[in-house]
Image (spheres, rainbow, N blue to C red):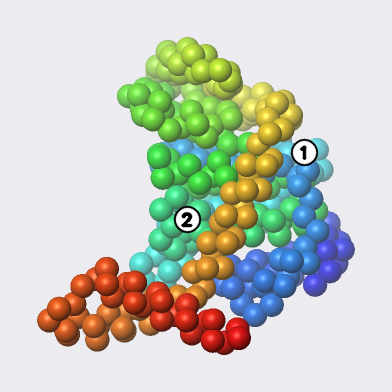
Amino acid sequence: MADSTLKELVKNGDYKLLARTLTRIENDLEGSEQLMKNLKIDLAIPVIGITGPPGAGKSTLINSLVNRITNEKKRVGILVIDPTSPFTSGSLLGDRIRMSDQSTHSNVFIRSIATRGSLGGLSAKTFEMVDVLRSAGFDYVLVETVGVGQSEIEIAGLADITIVVLIPEAGDEVQHIKSGLMEIADIFVVNKSDREGADTFANSLTKLLNQSQTKIPVIKTIATTSVGIDELYNKFSVVQSAKPEKNISLLTEKAWQTIQARKMKLYNKEALKKDIKKAIESPDFNLYHFSEQWMSGKENNIDKKVS
């Protein structure tokens, strides 16, 4: 697949090849590694990570943001990280249910990705799929994650700009913000700001954030009516230009994730389950001793194949 072909198809609103390419990457099908090596990734295309607790209105906020972006004739690629179904290992919520307004827009591509057990809310293949979108000629790539908290810090290793969406009722979470969210957020959004207590919460949040060396903007929005969306959109270029050193950290994190994913390909969970089933029949079974032997055996087999 040539980047030029993919860009031309995306430019014309034909996403079939893009969808097939992402499926190949996500499922680690034959040729996916070579495909990634051949990509010409445009690092100038901003990746916007959007996270926050359930019910904060992240999908509605994305809807409004996408309307703002497409009004300027720009193209947007969206990845929605959904919880994994325990039965099918597929996406549980589904992007088009929550973003039905955008699913048929010719300048918008939406794809759900199941977390598949990833604690940070990002599947192992999310990083690679984002880079495919960056090579396909989109003007923006948006990534929405499943939740928020200490385990969600992975989004900071993926996005050029991380937006944390909160609601006025989250006033009690200000103390939680100190424990991790200030480290990852480039912009805080207080959504549903027409609710009671929104001004007080936004002011308290601003005061807390002003105590840090880097002042993080707090923007009040009402995503359902697009209030505050222009201000949020205009902050993207300001925030990104203010943090040039983040690029090295992002590339380091992506390389680290890629190395981890490649290493884990040595191991098969179903094979592990089968071997454990046999091993526990031994009266002196020890999980840690078993794990060390099992890993050594797999790595030795790989070494033999290589040599």
Local secondary structure at mark 2: strand
SS type, badge 1:
loop
Residue at (51, 18) in percent of width and height: 212
Using a 10 Å C-alpha cutoff, classify the residue at mark 1 as few (fewer than 14 neighbours), some (14 to 19) or many (20 or more): few
Quadrant of the image containing the C terminus: bottom right
In this view, 202 is above or below 78: above
Q: Report the front residue among 122 and 179.
A: 179
Give residue 128's quadrant in the image: bottom right
* 134 left or right of 272 in image: right
Percent position of residue 51, x then y: 50, 40
Whether residue 213 is situated above or below residue 169 in the rendered picture: above
**Depth check: 289 or 281 in front?**
289
| Residue 200 drawn at (x, y percent) | 42, 13
Quadrant position of the N terminus in the picture: bottom right
Disc 1 residue type? Asn
Q: Which residue is found at the position 12% from the left and 81% from the top?
A: 283
**Which residue is disc 1 drawn over?**
71
Mark 1 or 2: in front is 2
Callout 2 environment at 10 Å: few (<14), some (14 to 19), or many (20+)?
many
Q: Quadrant of residue 226?
A: top right
| Residue 161, placed above or below residue 98 | above
5 sits left or right of 24 in the view: right
What residue did someone put label 2 on? Answer: 82
Residue kind at label 2, given as amino acid type: Asp
Q: If you read the primary sequence from the N terminus, does the residue marked by circle 1 or circle 2 appear first? A: 1
